[in-house]
Image: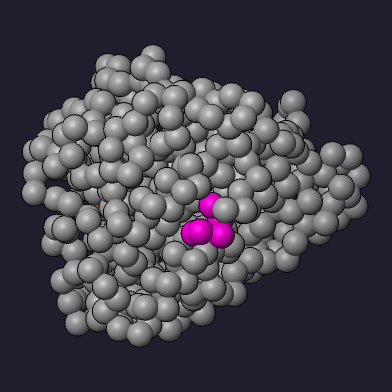
Amino acid sequence: MDDTTREAQTPPPAGGQLSRRSLLASMLAATAGAGLGLKAHAKEAAAPAAAQPAAAALPSRVALMCSEDPARLQRVAWRPGNPEAKALAQLLLAPAGPIAEADALTVEAETSVFNLPQGVPLARSSAAFTSLAPGTAYCYRVGDGASWSSWHTFRTAPEGAGSFRFLYFGDVQTEIRSQAARTLRAGWQAAPDARFALFAGDLVNHGFNDSQWDEFHEALGFMSGSVPLLPTPGNHDTKRETPAESLAAPYSAAPAYHANFSLPQNGPDIPELRGEAYYVDYQGVRVISINSNVLDDDRPLNEKHRQAWDGLLAWLETALRDNPNRWTVTTHHHPIYSGSEGRDNEGMRNLLRPLYDKYRVDLVLQGHDHCYCRTHKVAGDQVVAADAPGTVYMVSVSGPKLYTLDPKFKQLMAATRGKTQMYHTVDVTPDRLTVSGFAANGEPVDAFSLTKDEAGNSTLATV
Ligand SMILES: [Fe+2]
C-alpha cells in the first residue's frame, strides 16, 4: 500500500501546533480599489534609509498561498532574515512605473517558530492582505523595516465564475535542485498566466529536512512570489527524523513543512490537519486538499487517529455537498487507482470513491506512484460512458524518481506514460475543463476536456 513511509514519520512538537493555530497578523482594512486607504498609512510604511543589508538578513522563501477568498484575501509566507525583528509586509496597487514606498500600506505580520524534533527552530513569517479588490494587481514586499524582499506583483481573482488556468504537479521529492526544478520551470514557462500551482504531495523527500525545502524554494525561484501555491501533504512530507517520533501522529505533515506555508484554515476541526485539509473556491472551481496520509491505513491506529479519520471524512462530505461552484476538483497524494507495480490503496478507495460518485466530483489530482495515469470517466470502479456521471482520476510525477508503470486497474486507464517527468495545465471556463499534460521537455503527452451542460452533466473528450 505504501513505500517506506511509516518508519520515518513522527508527530509535530507542540510548538509547531501552537504556531499553526495562531496564524496571521493584523489585517489590512483599506478600500483597495481607491488607493486612498493605502496612502492614509503611508508614513508608517517608510523604510529607514539604511545601508544595504547583508544578504543573510534578507527575507527568503517568499511565497504566496491560495486563500479561502482569492478575490479579496491574499496570504504570503516567508523566512525572515532576522526572526527577532518585527515582521512586516507592504502593499500598494501595482503602479505602471517605479514604486513610491510612501504610497504603500504597512501590514504587521507574525513570526511563528516551528521546532524540529531536536529543538532546531525554524522561523516563518506570514501576513494577510485583506479587503482587496477583485481582479486587481497589487505589489507587495516583506521584511522587517530595514531589510526587505524585492517588490512582487500578484493579481486577485475576479469576482464569480470565469476563465483561468492553473498548474498541477505530481511528486517533486528528489534531486529537487538538479533535476525536478526544470519541470517546475517548464510548467511556468508554458503557463506564465497560471493563477495558482497545485502540488499533489511529496514536495520533498524528508519533510523534516530543511535543506530540501531550501531546494524546493530555489526550484520555484521568483515564481512563487507571484503565483500562489496549493500543496497537499504526501507521505514523505510527514517524515520526521526517527521512527519513534512518528508514533503520536503519523499522518500530519512535519513542522518543517508548515514552516513554508500559510494555508486556509477552513478544514476539519482537527488541530494537526490545519493547513493540510482545506478548500479553495477559485472562479467557479472548488479545489479540496485532503491529507490522504490520514486514510492510508486499514483502520485508525488509535483514538486520536480515529478522531482525525472521522473528522476528515465528515468535513469532506460537507465540503462536497455544500459546494456552490460548478466544478469540483480534489487533490490528495495517495491515488484511488494506483499506477505502479504492486501498489493499491484499497481502503482509501473504499472510503473516498463513494463520496466522489455521490457528489459527482469532476477531477481528482494525485501523486505518489511516480508515473502518469489518467482514467476514462469512472463511477463505481467501472468505466462509464463519456457523458454519464463519473470522475476522471489522474496520477502524475514532476521529479526524477520514477517507478515501473503497471496499474492494477488497467481497464480504467485512458492514458498512461512511464519514465517521464510531467507538468499539467488545467484551463477552466464556466463550461469546460481542459487538462493538458506535457513532458519536462515540452512534448505533449495527453490532453482531455470535460464539457458541462446547463444541467451540470459533463462529457469527457480527448483533445
Ligand atoms: Fe509518496
* Residue 160 in sight from this viewpoint: yes
* Residue appearing at x 34%, y 67% in the figure: 294
Residue 313, given in percent of the width and then of the height, sits at 44, 64
Query: Taking 15 as reference, is 254 left or right?
Result: left
Q: Quadrant of the C terminus?
A: top left
Which quarter shows the N terminus? bottom left
Percent from the top left, x then y, of residue 353? 36, 50
Which of the pair 125/305 is nearer the observer?
A: 305
Dividing the picture into quadrants, the one containing residue 88 is: bottom right
Residue lying farthest to the top in this orientation: 463
**Residue at position x 24%, y 44% from top?**
337
Q: Is residue 34 positioned above or below 125 on the image?
A: above
Q: Is residue 283 above or below residue 217?
A: above
Mark count: 0
- Residue range in magenta is 316-320
Question: Residue 341's image quarter?
Answer: top left
Q: Position of residue 171 (x, y in %)?
A: 28, 45
Q: Is residue 253 magenta?
A: no
**Residue 176 visible, this orientation:** no
Image point (45%, 35%), residue name:
389
The relative height of residue 208 versus residue 158 in the rendered view (above or below) is below
Was residue 319 drawn as part of the magenta stretch in this picture? yes
Q: Nearer the viewer, residue 168 or 343?
A: 343
How far from the left and from the top, in percent, is residue 306? 37, 78
Magenta stretch, main secondary structure, is helix
Q: Residue at x 30, y 21 (%)?
A: 446
Image side of residue 404 versus residue 188, left or right: left
